[in-house]
Image (cartoon, rainbow, N blue to C red):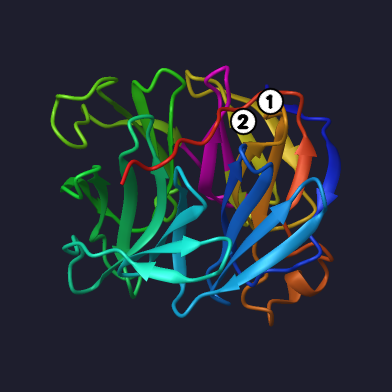
Amino acid sequence: MAMKMRAELIWSSADRCELGECPVWNAAEAALYWIDVVAPSVYRWEAATDRTRRFALPKPPASIFLDNSDRLLVAMRGSFAWLDTSTGELDSLAMDSPLGTDQRFNDGRCDRHGDIWISTMDRALKHNIGSLICIDSALKTGVVTTGAKLGNGICFSPDNTSLYFSDTFERTIYRYPLSAERGAGIGSLGPREVFVRLGDDAGRPDGCSVDSDGCLWSARVGGSRIDRYAPDGRLVDVLELPVSHPTHCAFGGPDLRTLFVTSSRHPKENVAFAREASAGAVLAYDVGVQGLAEHRCGL
């Protein structure tokens, strides 16, 4: 039986997003980045000074990736751009789009080789035309899986031999065998298996991260909680939250034992959000479990 986790809330962002997503901890800067999808922007919070900076974007972002310099790679809904975090300037990345006419980018993550894995989805959210795409350092792209409606929650096991991929609308987290080394072909995955399938109660799986024990932490959007699953799919811990719509989670802090959770208050007319003082905030919890460092893209 899953246990309710006793975790201390140690920080909450003053800024409130309409739809906060994609928290990424940059250990070299001791800073957290995240995005607002609805009010297009990237945020940077510096732990040492408790200062937050907002970078306005011309288009809605989908996800962000760390680089090996003072830049972030920002996936917009239909393109990529480099964000200079010292000046706020954007520089478009020239590449052939792997998107279909009715698709847009959504959640993404880098693996330990620096390859980008990013989901796509139907812009209208009507059809199961979403896919999982891999982009390598030479900007070669490969469509790895198809048939998703709302792909989310991409993350990797500590040994890089498993990839997790959530379909929020299907209430399912899938696991794929992944070649730990290069050479098997871009985005080479084995047969898909169901890792977790949720019932109709208490929300849907959204963004996720894996800790150093190989356990997966999944934001339950609409469910007011983060679920922690053992590598065999057992629910072992539940972190209850003061927000009904957590969207993503990532480890950070000096020892990677802080879990940062983004959340949503969109649409603001939702009466539930009016009762939640923290809706749209980023929440940070001392969970007493060490996470994994975020990989950087190799472009």
Question: Residue under circle 2?
Answer: 228
Q: Is residue 171 magenta?
A: no
In terms of secondary structure, where does tag 2 sit? strand
Q: Is residue 137 above or below residue 74?
A: above
Q: Is residue 231 above or below residue 56?
A: above
Residue 25 horizontal/vertical position (percent): 61, 43
Left or right: 207 as drawn, with respect to 116: right
Crowding at mark 2 (Cα within 10 Å: few <14, some 14-19, many 20+)? many
Residue 269 horizontal/vertical position (percent): 69, 82
Which quadrant of the structure image shows residue 254? top right
Instruction: Compare residues 16 and 5 and report the one nearer the observer.
Output: 16
Q: Indicate the amino acid at tag 2.
A: Arg
Picture quarter with the N terminus: top right
| Residue 241 circle label | none
Residue 140 horizontal/vertical position (percent): 16, 47
The mark total stands at 2
State the separation of the CA atoms marked 2 and 1: 9 Å
Q: Is residue 293 above or below residue 104?
A: above
Instruction: Compare residues 256 and 264 and report the one nearer the observer.
Output: 256
In terms of secondary structure, where does tag 1 sit? loop
Residue at point 76% right, 30% down? 287
Residue at point 85% right, 42% down? 10
**Span colored in magenta:** 197-218
Question: Residue under circle 1?
Answer: 2
User: In this rendering, does residue 20 appear at all?
Assistant: yes
Q: Indicate the amino acid at tag 1.
A: Ala
Residue at point 50% right, 75% down? 57
Crowding at mark 1 (Cα within 10 Å: few <14, some 14-19, many 20+)? few
Residue at point 74% right, 64% down? 279
Instruction: Compare residues 16 and 238 and report the one nearer the observer.
Output: 16
Residue 295 horizontal/vertical position (percent): 46, 35
State yes or no: discs 2 and 1 in contact (Cβ < 8 Å): yes
